[in-house]
Image: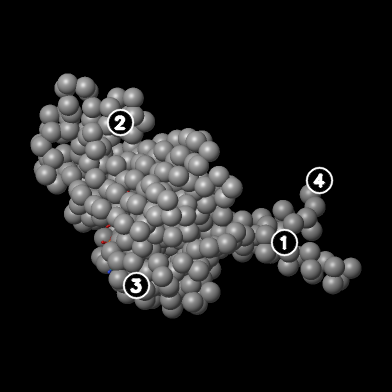
Amino acid sequence: MSFPNHPASLRRAAPPLRVVLLGLGNVGGGVFERLQADPSRFEVVRAIVRHPARHVAMGVPAGLLSTNPWDALNVAADVVVETLGGESTASGILHAALLRGRRVVSANKLAVVAGWPALRPWAEGPSPRLRFSAAVGGEVPVIETLLGLDGRDPVQRLRGVLNGTCNFVLDRIAAGQGYAGALAEAQARGFAEPDPAADVSGLDAECKLRLAAWAAFGRGPDTLHRQGIEHTGTARRDADSAVLRLVAELVRVGGRLEGRVAPQWCPPEDYLAGARGEENRVEIITGSGERIRLAGRGAGRWPTTASVLGDLDAVWQEHAGQRDQGFQGWRLATA
Ligand SMILES: NC(=O)c1ccc[n+]([C@@H]2O[C@H](COP(=O)([O-])OP(=O)(O)OC[C@H]3O[C@@H](n4cnc5c(N)ncnc54)[C@H](OP(=O)(O)O)[C@@H]3O)[C@@H](O)[C@H]2O)c1
């Protein structure tokens, strides 16, 4: 038996969420494919790229495409998904989209960190209009976990392998490969940043650490020291089987929050030593001594796409919830 006036039925019948995609690259292309497969919930109304002919050749309708990132705002839409990369253009568009009432999902840590003073109010509260789960940890729910922690047992320390490219390169070096060849392989596999300098210099991990600090502590670190992996010659120590990891760490020292991104020798019993290839791992230690450990694929098209879709799913739930409330109101008014 069906109940045509039941909210769930209404949710199914609701028009799809109109989505603008800024970028159809490694991540955006994956998101596009998934949204196209779910037309009852999502409709892509515009996609911004640099080389439209290439995307048309791959089957993207020409009428959807624009090469001007600001065109993302010139179409009626509910949500903007930003996977452009880069800093200044993207963070300006994120802010403008929010001011125009769009919900925003971004995978771009550089843009979110650069624009944070203006973006922060939109990222707070139980129903944030700006979500950026994919910007930290790929499929690993780092931001979601930190936001969900009970404030009565605050985070004391957080440490993690947050850059899959660096971990992959260090693993390959430990296995005897050269630095340049290992980095080229990470790029070929699609989990290096468009500009790998941001990965190997530790900047990418630094941005993730800053976002994690905001999620865990509501503020950025007081100090942040950064060192990358560009000058790594060896990544395995035979004497004690320790492996080199690019560790991003936040420690609360009295009232101060100290941050550090640097290569560290991790003994085999260290949780972070076990991160393999592009895997990300995070260990969160709370004031009461509770240890929360998270692991998963930190980069790559499909893990990152899954994380973007998690945010989009939350937006959809809110969208559908608002419609249900609207429906209840209508039913009461017409009863
Ligand atoms: N790759 C990952 O595993 C991963 C993981 C987590 C987060 N992220 C983040 O996701 C974002 C995207 O990464 P990605 O690997 O998907 O990059 P990508 O493959 O280089 O894709 C970037 C996309 O944006 C378009 N684009 C870039 N600049 C543009 C401009 N000025 N005007 C118009 N279009 C422009 C490109 O168009 P064309 O296709 O025409 O060149 C491309 O479609 C980055 O912020 C990255 O940090 C990536």
The N terminus lies in quadrant? top right
Q: Are marks 4 and 2 in contact (CB under 8 Å)?
A: no
Query: What's the distance in space between the residues labelled 4 and 2, CA to CA?
Result: 55 Å
* Residue that label 2 marks: 273
| Mark closest to the chain's N terminus, 1 or 4 | 4
Viewer-closest of 229 and 67: 229
In the rendered view, does 164 fall on the left or right side of 326?
left
Q: Nearer the viewer, mark 1 or mark 4?
A: 1
The outermost residue toward the front is 254
Query: What's the distance in space between the residues labelled 1 and 4, CA to CA?
Result: 21 Å
Above-or-below relation of 317 to 284 = below
| Label 4: element kind | loop
The answer as to whether callout 3 falls within 8 Å of ligand 1 is yes
The C terminus lies in quadrant? bottom right
Query: What's the distance in space between the residues labelled 3 and 2, CA to CA?
Result: 41 Å
What is the three-letter code of the residue carrying label 4?
Met
Query: What's the distance in space between the residues labelled 1 and 2, CA to CA?
Result: 48 Å
Q: Residue 324, labelled with which disc?
A: 1
- Please provide percent x and percent y for residue 39: 54, 56
| Label 1: element kind | helix
| Mark closest to the chain's N terminus, 4 or 3 | 4
Q: Is residue 147 visible?
A: yes
The outermost residue toward the top is 239
How many numbered markers are drawn?
A: 4
What is the three-letter code of the residue carrying label 1?
Asp
Q: Residue 69, labelled with which disc?
A: 3
Q: Residue 1, labelled with which disc?
A: 4
Q: Residue visible at 24% across and 38% down?
A: 264
